[in-house]
Amino acid sequence: MSKESFIYATHKAMIGDVALAGRPLTELVEEIQHTYLGDERPWIIGFSGGKDSTCILSLIYFAIKSLKKELRAKKPIYIVSSDTLVETPVVVDQINSVLATVEKQGKKDGIRITGHPVHPNQHETFWVNLLGKGYPAPQQKFRWCTERMKIDPVSAFIKQTAATSGEVILALGSRSKESASRSQVIAKHRIKGTSLGRHSTLSNAFTYMPIVDWDADEVWEYLMSAPCPWGGSNRALFELYKGSNQGECPLVIDKSTPSCGNSRFGCWTCTVVTKDRALEGLIESGEVWMKALLDFRNKIYVSTDPAKKKQYRNWKRRTGRVSYIAGHDINDDSNDEIRHIPGPYWLKVRQEWLKELLTIEKNLNDSGHQIELIKRYEIEAIRQEWLRDPNEPDWEDSLPKLFQEVYPEEHVDWVDNDAGVFTAHDSQLLQELSQKHDIPAELILKLLEQEIHVTGLGNRRGILKKLESILRRDWDALEVVNKRNQETKKQDLYKDKIDETKQELERINSLVCVE
């Protein structure tokens, strides 16, 4: 008996003797087979590399392999995994290894199964947003990363697949017992009388959740009892969990799917949690080289401290305006509280962080850990964001020099600087004139830049509105803007009091008239 035949026979024997969540596994396997053969809609298996998604991948692979050879290739099965480019490195290695092995074995078994890692748009990656645009590190109330880096890439793959086939079935490792809210969402979209559900946002996608009623212990019981149907075992996965003492980060397909940020495996850069216990656990279990990543992540996390935001972030938003939020602070009972909303990270902060990130990457590679912490196309995208920064345009084009300081031996064909028409010399001259005439240099730069953009054009329609928009930005110092805001606030309060008094007088007069 071959190794593959032995694994299959062992798996089959285990399936026949076990019932999980009150249901025989043989019955679940038959349901998977029936669902697979029931129509022509291709399957997309959401794979995050964790225990739940590994469990359904194993169940589905075994179920399809148990079919007659002529039925196994009825339709394609796509394994889609979301690689945000900042995933925990050991998890990425685990995912890539599984995808390669499954695809290779699938060819031998006559199963049309292929792996498809998806990535964020190159202008929406973590580093382009954080270091390029200056977005603040993600927090619970501003988790800008989930949609851009997880939902959108997966949705794009689903839409693209559905465009050629009409509809798709998305097989997921979601479980009702993960959370009460998740259970409600699953129940809400379940199609009565079938094993499928409707996707919450994509009308031509249907969901299939084979282990929806299982608990975590049942998932592990299956994984540790049955060998992988494509060969090997789940021991490496178990050791990964044991080493980190954490759960997995699920494949996020919509906003109802619980994202990471609860000390789970996911992005090593995640600042939604106070401490990344998954990374800490991996380091304690022997992955000492990852301490540099943890230290860098912790440095970014410090910038989320409200008391330190002035140190890290511009007081103007990317729109060029100073913004405030109405309502009282959590620790303040005053209804008159208006808090200032800081803008993007200062350019100097972003420059410092990028250089440190590149240095960590180089040191790790020099010590034998082949890793790319930031893609080279991300670096070029960051450069373009710096050159076009709405508040602090990098007229000196500092990024190429910064990169060469870390990687002096690496040759890069930088894109010609076509972001603007001004140079560092122009900026310095305008700064001198600014001090002499007490006019913000950035204001003059923006006005000149706008005029140059329409120079030689026959149609200058809208130029006056654009210039007016620039002039309306908050060019004064923050103290001046705050004082002006307070004066406006007082005027609004007086106006509100006057309006309330008028209404009260009208009410009294109406009562007098009635009497």
Image (cartoon, helix red, strand yellow):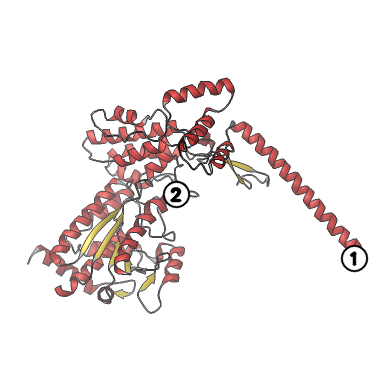
Residue 8 visible at all: yes
Which residue is at the front of the view, 325 or 7?
325
Q: In which quadrant will I find the C terminus?
A: bottom right
Residue tagged 1 = 514
> On the image, which quarter does residue 134 sit in?
top left
Total count of labels: 2
- For marks 2 and 1, give the one nearer the viewer: 1
Q: If you read the primary sequence from the N terminus, does the residue marked by circle 2 or circle 1 appear first?
A: 2
User: What amino acid type should be assigned to the residue bearing mark 1?
Assistant: Val
What is the x, y in percent for residue 212? 36, 68
**Placement of 59 over or under 125, stated as above or below:** below
Q: For this view, does 230 lie left or right of residue 287?
A: left
User: Where residue 43 sits in the image (x, y, percent)?
Assistant: 28, 67
Indicate the secondary structure of the residue bearing disc 1: helix
Q: Are marks 2 and 1 in contact (CB under 8 Å)?
A: no
Task: Tell me which amino acid carries mark 2.
Answer: Trp
Taking the image as shown, residue 174 lies to the left or right of residue 12, namely right
Mark 2: secondary structure: loop
| Residue count near mark 1 (Cα–Cα under 10 Å), binned few <14, some 14–19, many ≥20 | few
Report the residue that reaches farthest toward the bottom: 193
Residue at 26% x, 55% y is 238
Image disc number at residue 144: 2
Q: Position of residue 173 (x, y in %)?
A: 33, 63
Q: Residue at x 54, y 31 (%)?
A: 443
Could you say which is closer to the camera, residue 94 or residue 126? 126
